[in-house]
Amino acid sequence: MKTNSDAKKISVNSTVSLKGIVKAIFNDTIHIQVGGKIITIPTSHITP
């Protein structure tokens, strides 16, 4: 059986802007509703 050691890695560095409704704010995460989905974002990933 062949191992997957030859797997290619892709790295993307881009900025995404989404409009959504903030559902909950905790000490280290923010929960935002975008469409029918709720996305959890760590506050360390938020930049002013």
Image (cartoon, rainbow, N blue to C red):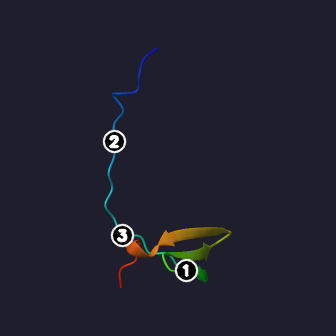
Tag 3: amino acid: Thr
Disc ID at residue 15:
3
Q: Are marks 3 and 1 in contact (CB under 8 Å)?
A: no
Whether tag 1 and tag 2 are in contact, CB under 8 A, the answer is no
Residue holding disc 1:
26
Label 1: few (<14), some (14–19) or many (≥20) C-alpha neighbours in 10 Å: few
Which numbered disc, 1 or 2, marks the residue closer to the eye?
A: 1
Tell me the element at label 2.
loop
Q: Which residue is mark 2?
A: 9
SS of the residue under disc 1:
loop
Q: Quadrant of residue 33?
A: bottom right
Confirm or deny contact between disc 2 and disc 3 (CB under 8 A).
no
Disc 3 crowd, CA 10 A, few/some/many (<14, 14-19, 20+): few
Q: Which callout, 2 or 3, points to the residue nearer the camera?
A: 2
**Structural distance between the alpha carbons of marks 3 and 1:** 23 Å
Q: How far apart are the two marked residues, 2 and 3, measured between alpha carbons?
A: 20 Å
Q: Given the current orientation, which residue lies at the most extreme bottom position?
A: 48
Residue found at the far right of this picture? 36
- Name the secondary structure under disc 3: loop
* Residue at position x 33%, y 64% in the image: 14
Left/right placement of residue 23 relative to residue 44 reads right
x and y percentages locating residue 29 in the rendered image: 51, 74
Q: Amino acid at mark 1?
A: Phe
Residue 34 image position (x, y, % from top left): 60, 73
* Labels 3 and 1: the sequence-earlier one: 3
